[in-house]
Amino acid sequence: MAQPFDEAERAAVYRAIYERRDMRHFSPGPVDPAVLARLLDAAHHAPSVGFMQPWRIVRITEAAVREQLQQAVERERLATADALGKRRDEFMKLKVEGMRECGELLVVALMDRREAHVFGRRTLPEMDLASVACAIQNMWLAARAEGLGMGWVSIFDVDEVHALLGMPPGARPVAILCVGHVEAFYPKPMLEMEHWAERKDLGECVYENRWPASPQG
């Protein structure tokens, strides 16, 4: 029978899970290239349906491209605010990205020609996106273990970022990741601290055998 990690190793894994945060506030300074390489390798060792490995990662090293991406996010931030109606002003007070401050900026995308991969996707084609999310989570946990913050920015126009980075037809940007040094990790998720939402009780999300009947019957 396979043996579990020892107590200290288990504690480290769970600590990374519970202390991982979606960071928006970064301190200046570059990320050590060796550490960045470890984070990228962690992402590349994520599980993927049919072992298709659909993630593609673009490292942004040109200041002009970083600025163009930040402007794209800002435009969508304003559009999102307008779409929120009564919560517009509340949303506009939130810091939703740290793209100018972070040491590394990465764009994670789905690969092109994904339709050729049928294994595991015939009835659930979105499993390619689930696989990319696993890669991002791997990197997030590894970053926390390395003492680095990471923030997932998803407020952008997909077609605009696709064109900006010269992606081939069929590829699709999924996330802009800010990675860098932080003064401290938030004690709670930032949106919880800002009273935007609260974590649900586990019992609200875990069912047994079948979906429960609604309170209305």
Image: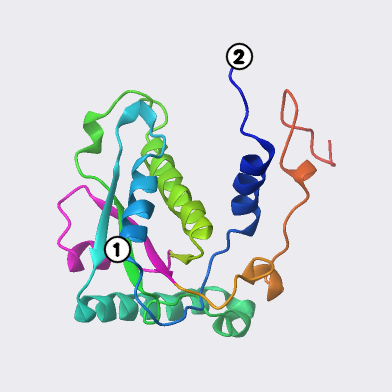
Q: Position of residue 144 (x, y in %)?
A: 52, 59
* Residue that mark 2 sits on: 1
Question: To which residue does mark 1 refer?
Answer: 33
Mark 1 falls on what kind of element? helix
Magenta residues (range): 154-180
Residue at position x 15%, y 52% in the image: 168
Residue 186 among those drawn in magenta: no
The type of residue carrying mark 2 is Met
Residue 11 vertical position relative to residue 122 in the rendered view, above or below: below
* Residue 173 as seen in the image, left or right of residue 86: left
Q: Quadrant of residue 50?
A: top left
Determine the CA span between mark 1 and mark 2: 38 Å
Q: Position of residue 120 (x, y in %)?
A: 38, 25
Percent of width and height locating residue 53 = 30, 37
Decide which of 107, 19 is in the foreground and name it.
Answer: 19
Q: Does residue 15 appear anywhere in the picture? A: yes
Mark 1 nearby-residue class (10 Å; few <14, some 14–19, many ≥20):
few
Disc number placed over residue 91 in the picture, else none:
none
